[in-house]
Amino acid sequence: MKKHFLLLTFILLTIVAGAQVGNINPDPDGDPWYVGGLRELTTADYEMLSKIPQWTAPYHDGTLTLPTQVDNTVNVWFRPIFNQSGGSCGQASGIGYNFTYEIDYARQVPANTTQNQYPTHFAWNFLNGGVGNGSWYFDGWLIVREAGCPTVYDYGGMSFGGETRWMSGYDLYENAMYNRVLDFYTIDVTTREGIETLKQWLYSRDGGTLPGGLANFGAGITAATITTLPYGTHNGGKTVITSWGPTSDHAMTFVGYDDEIVYDFNNDGQYTDDIDINGDGVVDMRDCEIGGLIMANSWGASWGFQGKAYVMYKLLADPMEQGGIWANMVHLLQAKPDGEPLLTIKTTIKHTSRNKIKIMAGIATDPEATRPEHVRSFPLFNYQGGDFYMKGGSSNSDKTIEIGLDITDLLSWVEPGEESRIFLQIIEQDPYQQGQGEIVSMSVIDYNNGQEETISDMQNINIANNDTTLIWTNATINFDKVAISTEALPDAAINFPYLAQLEAAGGTQPYAWSLNMAYHEEAVSDPFPAITTNELTPTNDDDGYAMLPLPFDFMFYGETYNELTILTDGAITFDGNFAYVRDDGAIIGNKCITAYCADLMMYPALGDGIFYEGDEASMTIRWKMSKWDMPAFDVDVAVALYPDGRIYFFYNDGITPATDWSAGVSTGDGNSFLIASVAGQMNIPANYAALIQSNPFPAGMEITSGGLFSGTPVAPEGTIYEIPFKVTGYDRISATKMLTFSALETSIATTESKPLLVEATPNPATDNLTIRAHKAGIYHFVLLDISGRKVANLYGGHLQAGEPVSIGISGFHLQPGVYLLQHTSTNGHGAQKIVVR
């Protein structure tokens, strides 16, 4: 995906890593104004950011008349302005303001009590390394989506216990599970249309009936130009920001807007939005001197006007190096006010160095299994919090913590009423034996029919040093599981628009649909590629990594990459950092590819090295390595990658026999992974090689979260695909099903020569299009461009035979050209050409 690379390139140019937290308030007796609270973003972050869906305004055609001023701080769901503690601005804006507002709005409760407010430090203390490092608001949202968030009342305050404290007590974690983020969205505010979309969100989330929300953003406030609106103009004398600094060091919250404020950027004595004031030859939002957003800061009510300031619209569109906000984007969130856990783990863990361990959970359908078949990781308790005792303090009692983990989604892998084995898994990465600990206790609590606790017989189990520790208990859970009810897909026509609505039943609605891409393995007889042409130089011979650009786009688990992170421990990852990928659990918990992973080390003087060779057709990476502190131990393996997503593993003769190694591929989510059949074998077969690949997927097709499988398939005639679909209920329990998709040879001309189910006039069309169905039924109409990309949703509902539906297409701002009017209905589906002038 080229957009991943472009977004990465842009953001790398506009953000400086690791800004140090500091107080920039010149008044030593005033409230501290902390900045530097945003961390450096990684490749994995950019991947995540590129997946965040755009929020689409209900009236994106510009027909909604907006008020000239909106200020959501007057709503009862907006908590009072507060002063953040330390570099917690990301969570002050994202949780303290935005999440509090959204969940209180959803529950219709006021935000002026601690029972309805949410603290900064619950999430921040998992993110700050125990030393106050910065984090982004979406870092906290990921934690709150998975684990929930306690109230300020339960937590003991906004920042109770400081920047190292981790909350202890199962009941507190259980209470937090009811307060979650459902999802979050982005708005590109580079253009006037983007800013209008943001204004619609701030005014009304549904176009006029429901109240609006808030939006988070990052910017460089240290070097910002903060002044006042001109006296004699609307709201003259109030604080306004007219330029941000070039380094993003602070996160804030947009709470409203005012179209009537003005500022004379070019000092020409007038306030305009229709002349080129920046001299770039284009008149756009970067030339706007009229209107701005209202920003709420987390520096106390004495800053700005009652803790707020205006931000001129121009700054949303300006590049960051010219005074704009970070990446010209803002983020919104949707809260989940009524979620509840159905299955949890209650556990007490003792450890002397919490950033050495990662806590995971797993499940197996075999009640006698000694390893989980499926595992899940969490965005907390994940090598986090710095080198501290579990609670963050220094007393002996701080070594021990009691926590709760919501593992409801693991029910996706078992059937209701059947006994399964539930695992608690702790991975310790501590090669220098700096920490030690134990799993004191573990139980599983089933909330499906009341509250039933099953206590594990495995108690006071020592955590294995630098290894994986597993304990378990068995349980039989009766629950309502979602299932895909669609039995078959209609045949598709090659190069012709296609649309099919998938259906599901059971579980909890609404459903969310996706693809469940899986890999499989087969042995091959290809020779070992003993390449030595090019050699990588990792950051360290032990626990190091090197970056390797790809000369092609490589597809892996539905994402496209053009750069690899090559680890000395034998793995390929994609986030530009070293990771301890050395065993099955680490493979499952990281997006990675590895033919042989272990605690490896490179001894260059003995001929060790990491070599590569490739072109636009393939890329091969070879690890000729030793074990750490064992230079006589020989490892010689290779991985070859191809643009179509194929992966080959190669094993040379002479690898030293061992069992403490693994191999496989994984998406890192705990659900989609493959541990290679050869992994951990004492003696690898001579010159063994394996092909790892996923089921082919038809180019041009996609599935929406609503279950609409559509696109224009591009495939050889007669190709048959087995596509694994996945549906997830509101309760986060999912189901998968393989459906056959056949691509037949049928041209658009042939299909259009058949009697049409619908008629569209006029054709060509300019401003309006009238559609009539020849048979009564439920219809859904979309407009596609000639490549099959959806450009507009036109209509959905029941139509009588001959009933006209008039659609104003001018509001979609379509370029003149040929489009496809596609419909799906209870009478079938089809498409026809429409010319737009």
Image (cartoon, rainbow, N blue to C red):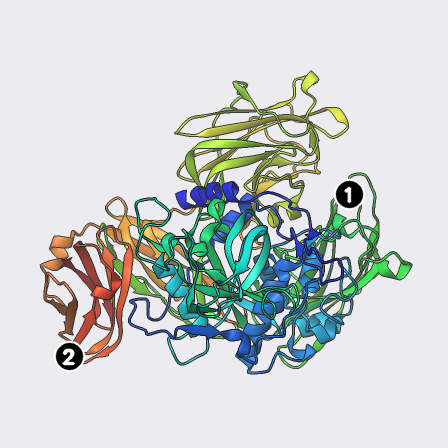
Can residue 441 be seen in the rendering of this structure? no
Left or right of 836: which side holds 675? right
Q: What SS does tag 1 mark?
A: loop
Image coords of residue 208 (percent x, y): 38, 78
CA–CA distance in space, label 1 to label 2: 71 Å
Which image quarter holds the N terminus? top left
Q: How many marks?
A: 2
Left or right of 423: which side holds 836? left
Within 10 Å of disc 1 (Cα), the crowding (few <14, some 14-19, many 20+) is: some
Image coords of residue 450 (percent x, y): 66, 82
Can residue 255 be seen in the rendering of this structure? yes
Left or right of 759: which side holds 407? right
Q: Residue furthest right?
A: 396
Q: Amino acid at mark 1?
A: Asp
Q: Residue at x 67, y 71 (%)?
A: 176
Image coords of residue 483 (percent x, y): 46, 69
Q: Residue at x 63, y 56 (%)?
A: 377
Q: Residue at x 69, y 55 (%)?
A: 26
Q: Is residue 522 above or below residue 51?
A: above
Q: Nearer the viewer, residue 389 or 67?
A: 67
Q: Nearer the viewer, residue 618 or 720?
A: 618
Which image quarter holds the C terminus? bottom left
- Residue that mark 2 sits on: 803
- Residue that mark 1 sits on: 430
Image coords of residue 573 (percent x, y): 56, 40
Q: Which mark is residue 267?
A: none
Within 10 Å of disc 2 (Cα), the crowding (few <14, some 14-19, many 20+) is: some
